[in-house]
Amino acid sequence: MNRIIPVLVLALACSTSPLEVREISQDDLLSEPDSTLILDVRTSSEFSSGHVPNAVNIPHDQLAGRLAEIEDFRNASVVVYCEQGGRAGMAASVLADAGFSTIRHLEGDMSGWRERDLPTETAGT
């Protein structure tokens, strides 16, 4: 199932236009190229307890102030996830507002990843 999460972006002409944030399946994420940024927007403690391999952690409420850390991915693919989707939606909006061009949302988020018993990393691994 390919869902689209609408995110409104302020256009230069001060009108809004929707940015499509498509979902990416867990299986498809596992085969993504290394050039894809996997962005975990949960808290640091949630991230430390287990996350998608190679994910970068920037909590959703810190993302706007830490965009410089992921600037190299502005024109690359960014896959965002949280625990169940709410914070990922907020983060996608921040990314869209900042001009990130390809934003996707991980289907099922971390809870779905765990349900399928897919590989995880913990802090320090």
Image (cartoon, rainbow, N blue to C red):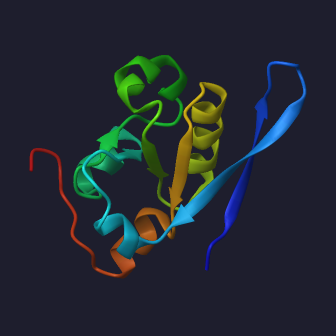
> Looking at the image, which is closer to me, 114 or 67?
67
Q: Position of residue 74 (x, y in %)?
A: 47, 30
The structure residue drawn at horizontal position 24% and vertical position 47%, both measured from the top left corner, is 48
Q: Is 99 situated above or below 85?
A: above
> Can residue 41 be seen from the camera position used here?
no
The structure residue drawn at horizontal position 90% and vertical position 27%, both measured from the top left corner, is 15
> Which quadrant does the N terminus fall into?
bottom right
The structure residue drawn at horizontal position 56% and vertical position 64%, both measured from the top left corner, is 23
What is the count of numbered marks? 0
> Looking at the image, which is closer to me, 4 or 84?
4
Classify residue 45 by image quadrant.
top left
Q: Is 34 situated above or below 32?
A: above
Q: Is residue 111 left or right of residue 32?
A: right
> Looking at the image, which is closer to me, 108 or 33?
33
Q: Is residue 125 left or right of residue 46?
A: left
Classify residue 32 by image quadrant.
bottom left
Q: Is residue 84 left or right of residue 86?
A: left
> Can residue 116 be seen from the camera position used here?
yes
Q: Position of residue 44 (x, y in %)?
A: 33, 39
